[in-house]
Image: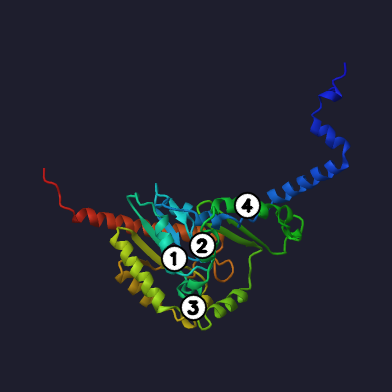
Amino acid sequence: MSTDLPKHNLPKVLRFVARERVAQALLLTLSIILLLGLTRRNDDTGPKLVKFSWKACADVVVAGDSRTGGGVSPGQLKQFLPGMRILNYAFAGIGYGPEYLDAIEGVLNPDSQQKIIILGISPQSLTEKMAQNNSFLDLQNTYAFRSPRLAACCQKLLKFTAPIKMKDALGGRLVDPHIQRQYRHSHADGWTAAYDDPPLQDFSGYLRDAHNIFDNNPVSPDLVKNLTNRVARWQSQGIHVYAFRMPTIPEMVAIENNQGEFDEQRFALAFEQAGGKWLTVDQFRYPSLDGSHLNRDGALEFSRDLGRIISARETSAQNTKLASEPQMRL
């Protein structure tokens, strides 16, 4: 007995596709789009819009520019700050202007029993140009009266269907492995992991950009003062505030110190006088992506080290607080 299904039992859609060439072409096109979209290694579209919509949802907020965005993993911090909701609220090219400082505070959950703000300090984030023109302000101006989450979904769809270079197709498996490919993956907690394959060896491009950033645009004393004033206010509200200089390479540090006129010791002193806790970290221990940002492995290692330092500081502060409280007599 034949096991073939009667023709009239086949789904109508399949029968239509079987006899219509246009439908066959559409099905083939959709299949190729799905195949290429699902094998993309880059996922750097949309998360910044989701970040922009965060409100009153974290115990720990990590803030800063793209160095912090790619250099601090909340997932690694959680190993040393268990049970805390940690989000990376960094944005590319950010400056520590009043709008961004307000937004950082707004991400903290007001009902949290332990509130922490962690500031990644890049000297360029203390310049007037960055404070006046950056991706956070662009989002604020664009999505102030719209839904950032809906925009993020639409942007992800556009990214999924966007043209793709041959070197990136099928995860880069179709081209010479010596051709450099850039991979970016944005996590739900705000961290964007980045690496190049093979790794970039020539950092001259980013060093040249650093010179341009600081051209007639040194670190602003007014921005530093406004930031430390905000730190003092946060401390008075019971928020613990930590800051550190994001690791990079020696050549970049030299540009920032000289052309950018950044005095790390003076800044750290002002920060601590405002009640914050300045963390001295090894600037050159962690592998760089491009001469400015950390690569994925460097970010993971740095985040673990940062978590250890902050956890120790928090434990010490808690012990000091307990020791200063009146002891109950039995």
> Closer to the N terminus: mark 3 or mark 4?
4
User: Quarter holding the N terminus?
Assistant: top right
Lateral position of residue 21 relative to residue 95, left or right: right
**Residue 260 visible to an observer of this rendering:** yes
Q: CA distance from mark 3 to mark 4?
A: 38 Å
Quadrant of the rendered image containing residue 236: bottom left
N-terminal-most mark, 1 or 4: 1
Q: Decide: marks 4, 2 in contact (CB < 8 A)?
A: no
Q: Quadrant of residue 213?
A: bottom right
CA distance separating discs 4 and 2: 18 Å
Distance from the alpha carbon under mark 2 to that under mark 1:
9 Å
Element under disc 3: helix
- Residue hosting label 2: 140
Q: Is residue 290 left or right of residue 62?
A: right
Q: Nearer the viewer, residue 57 or 172?
A: 57
SS under mark 1 = helix
Q: Observer-nearest residue: 16 or 94?
A: 16
Q: Which residue is mark 1?
A: 99
Pointer 2 local density, CA inside 10 Å: few below 14, some 14–19, many at least 20 = some
Give the side of residue 7 with respect to residue 254, left or right: right
Label 4: which secondary element:
helix
Q: Amino acid at mark 3?
A: Glu
Camera-side mark, 1 or 3: 1
Identify the residue at image location x=46%, y=74%.
123
Q: Residue furthest left?
A: 330
Q: What's the residue type where badge 4 is placed? A: Cys
- Using the numbered discs, state the Cα–Cα distance from disc 1 to disc 3 in whole angstroms: 24 Å
